[in-house]
């Protein structure tokens, strides 16, 4: 990444993922051309998130510790306080879990990731909070390819995918919650030429996805109704969608809380974590300020 180029994480029509593009940026403006407004639909928000990192593959102990520390610091920070206007309070860090490296070198969300998380929950390796506060952040090792394919997207890590969030139905496991909410952050070193940029690219994607996972945790579920039933599925979709800019008259989707702001991420937004250290984050759309903000 040179001084004139920023890898901007741009939201795609899939609603819940960030796509990477290389874009020359010379402005730090905080308002996109479209004037967003996040509307509250019938789905839940995660008020007191408990972040539980899952590490898939060969990821060093030091990197795991850094990611664990990052989440614990930013969910109790001035940046996270931006979410207070949407009913989100300070969060906490849960526990981490490692999946050995001897598994797949290609992971598809539907074919591999959802079944993996379902299996981990079923065997008790991960235990979702019965109050619905758990979010599992799945970080993928280098040389493992991630694909995210649905009615709206066909995305691939190290090509056009930096992260996404989704949910898997675990109703039949009788664990007290119907869905397990998760984010997926592939290894994004391929987009950044230096270790320092690698860390910030990961943190930007992680912050983007976590903020959307707590404000719109079941949006993939909502959009499946819309994708399979069209306008007839709108009422069902509205029962699962939470905070999103979606025009129910024109059926036009604009984005989730972090989608509007990645084009305005220069310079890199930061926050002071609960451990008093500085961390890279993603700007978020504030209805209150009518702008993208990070503090």
Image (cartoon, rainbow, N blue to C red):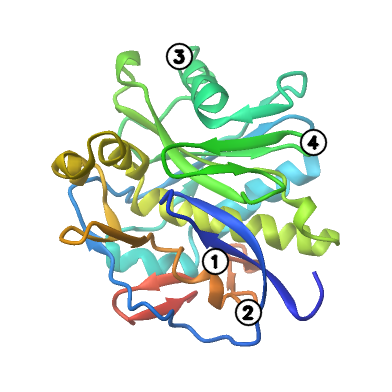
Quarter of the image with the N terminus in it: bottom right
Secondary structure found at label 4: loop
Q: Nearer the viewer, residue 11 or 280?
A: 11
Q: Whole-Å distance between the Cαs marked 3 and 1?
A: 33 Å
Q: Which residue is mark 2?
A: 266
Q: Nearer the viewer, mark 2 or mark 1?
A: 2
Label whose residue precedes the other's in the sequence (4 or 1): 4
Q: Is residue 252 above or below residue 133?
A: below
Q: Nearer the viewer, residue 195 or 115?
A: 115
Q: Which residue is mark 1?
A: 282
Instruction: Indicate the quadrant where residue 177 lies.
Output: top left
Is mark 4 in CB contact (under 8 Å) with mark 3? no
Q: Nearer the viewer, residue 111 or 287?
A: 111
Q: Nearer the viewer, residue 180 or 89?
A: 180
Q: Which residue is mark 3?
A: 122
Q: Position of residue 48 (x, y in %)?
A: 36, 49
Is mark 3 in CB contact (under 8 Å) with mark 1? no
Q: Whole-Å distance between the Cαs marked 3 and 2?
A: 43 Å
Q: Position of residue 31 (x, y in %)?
A: 43, 82
Label whose residue precedes the other's in the sequence (2 or 1): 2
Q: Which residue is mark 4?
A: 143
Label whose residue precedes the other's in the sequence (4 or 3): 3
Q: Whole-Å distance between the Cαs marked 4 and 1?
A: 25 Å
């Amino acid at each position: 990444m040179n001084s004139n180029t920023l890898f901007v994480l741009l939201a795609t029509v899939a609603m819940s993922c960030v796509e990477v593009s290389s874009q020359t940026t010379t402005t730090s403006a905080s308002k996109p051309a479209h004037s967003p407004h996040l509307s509250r639909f019938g789905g839940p928000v995660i008020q007191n998130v408990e972040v539980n990192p899952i590490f898939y593959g060969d990821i060093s102990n030091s990197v795991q510790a850094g990611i664990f520390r990052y989440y614990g610091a930013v969910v109790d920070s001035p940046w996270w306080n931006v979410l207070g206007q949407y009913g989100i309070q300070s969060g906490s860090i849960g526990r981490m879990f490692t999946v050995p490296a001897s598994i797949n070198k290609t992971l598809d969300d539907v074919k591999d990731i959802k079944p993996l998380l379902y299996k981990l929950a079923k065997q008790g390796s991960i235990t979702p909070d019965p109050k619905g506060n758990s979010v599992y952040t799945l970080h993928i090792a280098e040389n493992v390819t991630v694909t995210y394919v649905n009615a709206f997207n066909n995305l691939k890590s190290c090509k056009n995918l930096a992260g996404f969030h989704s949910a898997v139905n675990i109703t039949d496991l009788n664990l007290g919650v119907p869905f397990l909410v998760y984010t997926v952050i592939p290894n994004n070193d391929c987009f950044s030429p230096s270790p320092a940029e690698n860390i910030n690219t990961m943190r930007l994607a992680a912050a983007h996805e976590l903020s959307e996972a707590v404000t719109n945790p079941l949006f993939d579920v909502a959009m499946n109704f819309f994708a399979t039933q069209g306008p007839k599925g709108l009422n069902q979709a509205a029962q699962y969608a939470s905070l999103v800019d979606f025009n129910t008259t024109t059926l036009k989707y604009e984005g989730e809380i972090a989608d509007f702001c990645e084009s305005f991420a220069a310079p890199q937004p930061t926050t002071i974590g609960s451990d008093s250290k500085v961390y890279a984050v993603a700007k978020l759309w504030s209805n209150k300020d009518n702008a993208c903000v990070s503090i």
